[in-house]
Amino acid sequence: EGWFFQWAFTGACATIVAGSVAERTRLEAYFVYSIVLTTFIYPVVVHWGWNGGFLSAWGAYPDEDGVPRPLFQRDSDSNGMIDFAGSGVVHMVGGFSGLMG
């Protein structure tokens, strides 16, 4: 159901890397880098931030009443990461990957 949506975000993440390593890497190295990024790295970080992972504002740990609480303090005063329209995770992964590339 959300496959195309996630595929588009993964492609955006890979193109951020392309802009940061342009003319500094070989094309073959960029292809390998993009495959590793989109297959292994990006899905893990997306799960941490979006799907109730430990960075998510909706939390990965429910309290005794079943209300999900973030990892940080696990109380009503604690806030997790709220990623508006997915831009934070996409640009963070792309930017850090480009920095490492």
Image: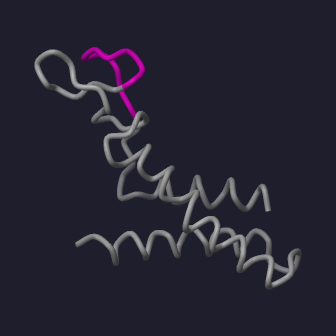
**Is the residue 32 above or below the residue 73 in the image?**
below
User: Residue 29 vs residue 60: left or right?
Assistant: right
Residue at 27% of width from left, 35% of height from top? 58
**Is the residue 98 above or below the residue 72 in the image?**
below
Which quadrant would residue 93 be assigned to in this image?
A: bottom right
Percent of width and height locating residue 23: 86, 80
Depth order, front residue of 75/29: 29
**Is the residue 67 above or below the residue 89 in the image?**
above
- The quarter of the rendered structure image containing the N terminus is bottom left
Q: Residue furthest left?
A: 65
- Most common secondary structure along the magenta stretch: loop
Q: What stretch is highlighted in magenta?
A: 71-80
Percent of width and height locating residue 74: 32, 17
Report if residue 41 lies within the magenta region: no
User: Residue 83 vs residue 88: left or right?
Assistant: left
User: Residue 99 vs residue 53: left or right?
Assistant: right
Residue at 34% of width from left, 20% of height from top? 78
